[in-house]
């Protein structure tokens, strides 16, 4: 079956059967979306939180291993209290995220849950530092301790 030609049939409810007519509506496909992503060559800034489950309370060794994977992938990881910010090409970020899962599983974690928040821009190249500096410039002295 050609994925691009998949459609769904919508039928109105109620009335007699003869009065109901089928309406054909094309559906969106992942194939079309995939081509759009490749054409844009998108950079992404992502906030990821990888959480191994079933390994006890201390997760430091698993987080450190994932950080090594992100560093090796060249994604400029910035560790913070509840996750890590990374930046790079779409495919590279998600390949590294998969590698993090594989590494944590290989360390004995039977389950790994990950939360991801991400943003993309096509009008300019954005970095983690540029996002932070634009806000910090506006904040100015407000973040300095008062004497």
Image (tube, rainbow, N blue to C red):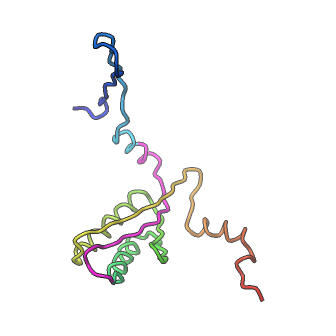
| Residue 100, percent from left and from top | 32, 70
Seen from the viewer's position, the closer of residues 70 and 18 is: 18
User: Magenta includes 53?
Assistant: yes
Q: Is residue 144 left or right of residue 38?
A: right
Which residues make up the magenta segment?
36-57
| Residue 35, percent from left and from top | 39, 43
Q: In the figure, residue 62 lies in which quadrant?
A: bottom left
Compared to residue 89, the image places residue 53 above or below, namely below
Compared to residue 36, the image places residue 120 above or below, namely below
Q: In the figure, residue 65 lies in which quadrant?
A: bottom left
Residue under the point 37% across and 74% down: 72
The residue sitting at the right extreme is 147
Q: In the figure, residue 110 lies in which quadrant?
A: bottom left
Q: Is residue 73 left or right of residue 126?
A: left
Compared to residue 112, the image places residue 58 above or below, namely below
- The mark total stands at 0
User: Magenta includes 59?
Assistant: no
Seen from the viewer's position, the closer of residues 95 and 105 is: 105
| Residue 8, percent from left and from top | 31, 28
Residue under the point 34% across and 25% down: 10
Residue under the point 41% across and 75% down: 71
Compared to residue 30, the image places residue 125 above or below, namely below
């Amino acid at each position: 079956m050609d994925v691009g030609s998949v459609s769904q049939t919508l039928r109105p409810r109620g009335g007699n059967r003869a009065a109901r007519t089928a309406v054909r509506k094309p559906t969106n496909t992942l194939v079309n979306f995939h081509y759009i992503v490749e054409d844009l060559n998108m950079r992404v800034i992502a906030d990821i939180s990888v959480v191994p489950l079933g390994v006890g309370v201390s997760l430091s060794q698993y987080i450190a291993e994932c950080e090594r994977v992100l560093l090796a992938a060249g994604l400029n990881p910035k560790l913070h209290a509840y996750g890590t910010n990374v930046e790079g090409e779409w495919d590279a970020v998600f390949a590294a995220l998969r590698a993090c899962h594989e590494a944590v599983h290989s360390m004995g974690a039977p389950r790994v849950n990950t939360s991801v928040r991400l943003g993309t821009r096509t009008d300019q190249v954005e970095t983690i530092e540029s996002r932070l500096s634009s806000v910090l410039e506006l904040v100015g002295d407000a973040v300095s301790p008062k004497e």
